[in-house]
């Protein structure tokens, strides 16, 4: 579970995140949406323990990310919007390195790595250097790295960037499977059709504040017209009816 209570992040006099509260529950894919500069990535960086809040509390699995950062990171899988890979390593070497970072023996992670490589159609590439991977393959390897230690919470910033239609479908199925196993999946995306298809609940942040929150169907209904989709609702909420 993710619990955010009255979160504020200031840079001087500017509040990038301004009194944000929300809850993402186990077994739920929670979409965190907003225009560019709305505060999404700032919130996610705090959630992942990469930035400190100015005030408020953030907990993952009941663990405060400021008071007990190492414990919080141990149960969290994080995929940033601009992932970094050591491209001179092979895929397998990268995954073993990540397992070491989480202090997990490779013998405990190897079977899961094989399953994830097969699910995302990367089997056969694990012994190739990452520099030979396509952009989409690198994206999938980063996702596998985040899932390798079987985290209770998965935080993903723009999971579909650079993926073709088949890879997007594979990732959607994987995220749904993780949620069905009781994991909390928290994601941001500008691809609103993806958010509408996969998210159980949604929050829309605008100018640092939550402008709408609730089950996806209820947020979509705020589009205001028969046949409205999430894009209609998003634009109405963030830019007005026109």
Image (cartoon, rainbow, N blue to C red):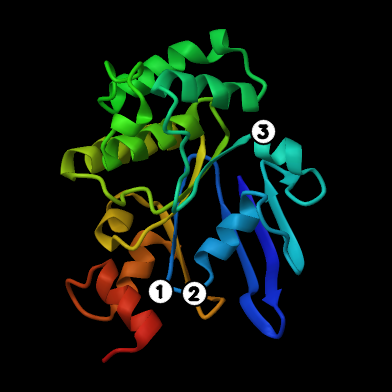
Q: Residues within 10 Å of mark 3 (few under 14, many from 20)?
A: some
The foreground one among 171 and 100 is: 100
Q: Position of residue 18 (x, y in %)?
A: 64, 76
Which quadrant of the rendered structure holds the C terminus? bottom left
Which quadrant of the rendered structure holds the N terminus? top right
Residue 176 seen in render: no
Residue under the image location 44 percent in, 52 percent down: 82
Q: Residue extending furthest top?
A: 107
Q: Which residue was labeled with disc 2?
A: 38
Q: Quadrant of residue 144?
A: top left
Label 3, secondary structure: give it: helix
Disc on res. 200: none
Check if mark 2's residue and mark 3's residue have beta carbons within 8 Å. no
Q: Which residue was labeled with disc 3?
A: 74
Closer to the chain start, of discs 2 and 3, is: 2
Q: Position of residue 65 (x, y in %)?
A: 73, 49
Residue 223 seen in render: yes
Q: Residue extending furthest bottom?
A: 242
Q: Position of residue 149 (x, y in %)?
A: 56, 25
Mark pair 1, 3: CA separation: 30 Å
Q: Residues within 10 Å of mark 1 (few under 14, many from 20)?
A: some
Q: Quadrant of residue 134?
A: top left
Label 2, secondary structure: give it: loop
Label 1, secondary structure: give it: loop
Mark pair 2, 3: CA separation: 28 Å
Q: Is residue 49 left or right of residue 169?
A: right
The foreground one among 40 and 161 is: 161
Q: Position of residue 197 (x, y in %)?
A: 27, 52
Residue under the image location 75 percent in, 65 percent down: 56
Check if mark 1's residue and mark 2's residue have beta carbons within 8 Å. yes
Disc on res. 35: 1
The foreground one among 21 and 39 is: 39
């Amino acid at each position: 579970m993710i619990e955010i209570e009255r979160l504020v992040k200031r840079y001087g006099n500017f509040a990038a995140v301004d009194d944000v509260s929300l809850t993402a529950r186990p077994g739920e894919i929670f979409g965190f949406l907003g225009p560019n500069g709305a505060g999404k990535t700032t919130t996610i960086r705090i959630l992942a323990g990469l930035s400190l809040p100015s005030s408020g509390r953030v907990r993952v699995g009941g663990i405060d990310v400021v008071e007990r950062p190492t414990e919080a990171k141990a149960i969290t899988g994080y995929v940033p919007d601009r992932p970094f890979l050591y491209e001179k390593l092979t895929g397998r070497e990268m995954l073993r390195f990540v397992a070491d970072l989480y202090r997990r023996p490779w013998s405990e992670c190897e079977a899961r790595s094989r399953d994830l490589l097969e699910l995302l159609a990367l089997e056969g590439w694990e012994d190739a250097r990452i520099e030979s991977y396509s952009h989409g393959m690198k994206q999938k390897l980063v996702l596998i790295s985040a899932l390798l230690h079987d985290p209770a919470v998965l935080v993903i910033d723009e999971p579909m960037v650079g993926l073709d239609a088949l890879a997007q479908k594979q990732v959607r199925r994987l995220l749904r499977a993780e949620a069905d196993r009781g994991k909390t999946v928290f994601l941001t995306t500008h691809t609103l059709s993806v958010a509408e298809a996969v998210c159980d609940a949604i929050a829309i942040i605008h100018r640092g504040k939550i402008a709408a929150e609730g089950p996806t169907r209820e947020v979509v209904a705020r589009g205001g017209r028969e046949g409205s989709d999430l894009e209609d609702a998003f634009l109405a909420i963030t830019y007005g009816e026109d």
